Image (tube, rainbow, N blue to C red):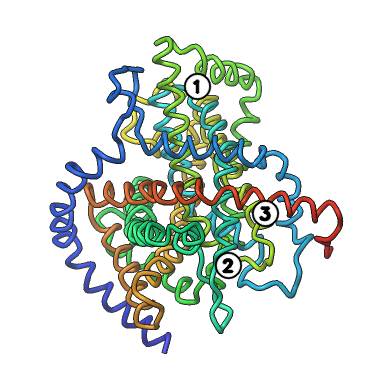
Amino acid sequence: MKNKISLLIIMLISSISSKAATLSETIDSFFKPIVDNFLLPVIFWDPIKAMGFDVGADVPIVVVWLVFGAVYFTFKMNFINFRGFKHAIGLVKGDYDDPNDKGEVSHFQALTTALSATVGLGNIAGVAIAISVGGPGATFWMIVAGLLGMSAKFVECTLGVKYRKLDENGEVSGGPMYYLRDGLAKYNMAGFGKVLAVLFAILCVGGSFGGGNMFQANQAYEIIGVQFPMMADNGPMFGLILAILVGAVIIGGIKSIANVTEKIVPFMAALYVGAALIIILLNITEIGNVFSLIFKGAFTPTAGLGGVIGVLIQGFRRAAFSNEAGVGSASIAHSAAKTNEPVSEGIVALLEPFIDTVVICTMTALVIIITGHHELSGSFDGGASLTSAAFGSVMFWFPYLLVVAIFLFAFSTMISWSYYGLKAWTFLFGKSKVSEYSYKLLFLSFIVIGSSVKLGAVLDFSDMMILAMAFPNIVGLLILSKEVKFDLNSYFSRLKSGEIKKYK
């Protein structure tokens, strides 16, 4: 059955690729007024300017909302981002794994699946753009925002496990859709919770097709085309090959996805971070000057107070967009973890922003600054080309290694976002084979479209849908945070007493 469906998917994708340009132009022209007239004014509304202040930089409401959530949960949970770090390592190692726990994947597999969705092109291109606009000082605030985001990730992933649903086959469905609907119902807000859950699911499906799919395929093809000119004008073929690779993984569900991500994510992170460390070590005499530039740029930019706020916003914006803490997407993957302790999975999840932002994004920033390319940012068309040039300035073959990393980043992001979108899709339309395979067919088709043509408003629309997921999600997190704190205190009390046992 699966082989026949796979063949049908490939045939349909092939036919779509020939019509992709016309189709995308039609879709693009449809979405442009929606983006310009509705989404941009709402999601990137600047509350500071609305109050009559000019701080020298735009302050989008979505960034304010994400940062507010991260700061609030850090204090509410008594700095769980720091005090839970050591225990998180033990959980990921499997020290507390009970073979009788319900779920589909291990703590480590849930972590790598969620990481594969957040570690993407934003770590390469987005960081470069932040430094181009905000200077080296943006790196400092990016790290601060990453550390704060660990607390938001803890709260949403704890709730994801707490309110998940297991069917008769042991298959898990979880995430903001469920804790918004069922969690808020406990507080006599059933109607409000349902509205937030449906809104989140709609946004998640849209985000999975665009930011989690078309954008990844589009950017991967463009970057590969620069390094390998023979790939020029072969976007549909590239997209078809990529769709086949993605389809081979996602047809098997979360267990298949987790089996792939647990191998890819450590490899691609080691590959990228390793290359960055080589460049840093080759320029180790400059490291003191680099950190000096970062700290001075963070607190004393040339533009005074307005400049400080501008740099801070660039750093916070990049971190928030990269690790998606507060967006709620990662809790869908973490809900599938084998555990009967929701708090334990929340503690595992707090490692995500640390790895994504504090480690990988910082490595990108250090390479750009230590090679001096932060001063040449105006000479490049985009963030990815700036990062590639910084890597290539040390060893000519490094950009080719970067291409491999970019392909893996894009591929892993797509397979994880396919799972997020599928769970939101089945929440909206019901769970059935027809529902499941109709979503996967659409998802794979959009890979070909994303690789084939340049998409403007469609990608803007989908990116904004991912960011907009933060609005209903954080509202729910704020309401439910009291019970998360209660559960957290109970968990640590039982951990200290030995009630929660080590198995290794």
Instruction: Indicate the amino acid at tag 2.
Output: Ala
Q: Residue at x 56, y 57 (%)?
A: 159
Residue 394 marker: none
Type of amino acid under label 3: Asp
User: Horizontal and vertical percent for residue 315?
Assistant: 47, 30
**Mark 1 is on which residue type?**
Gly
Q: Earlier in the sequence, mark 3 or mark 2?
A: 2
Confirm whether residue 51 shows in the render. yes
- Report if the CB atoms under discs 1 and 3 are less than 8 Å apart: no
Categorize mark 1 by other alpha carbons within 10 Å: few (<14), some (14-19), many (20+).
Answer: many
Can you see residue 228?
no
Q: Is residue 194 left or right of residue 72?
A: left
Residue farthest toward the front in the current orientation of the protein: 188
Question: Which tag is nearer the camera, tag 3 or tag 2?
Answer: 3
In the picture, the quarter occupied by the N terminus is: bottom left
**In this rendering, the label closer to the viewer, 1 or 3:** 3
Q: Secondary structure at mark 3?
A: helix
Residue at numbered disc 2: 336
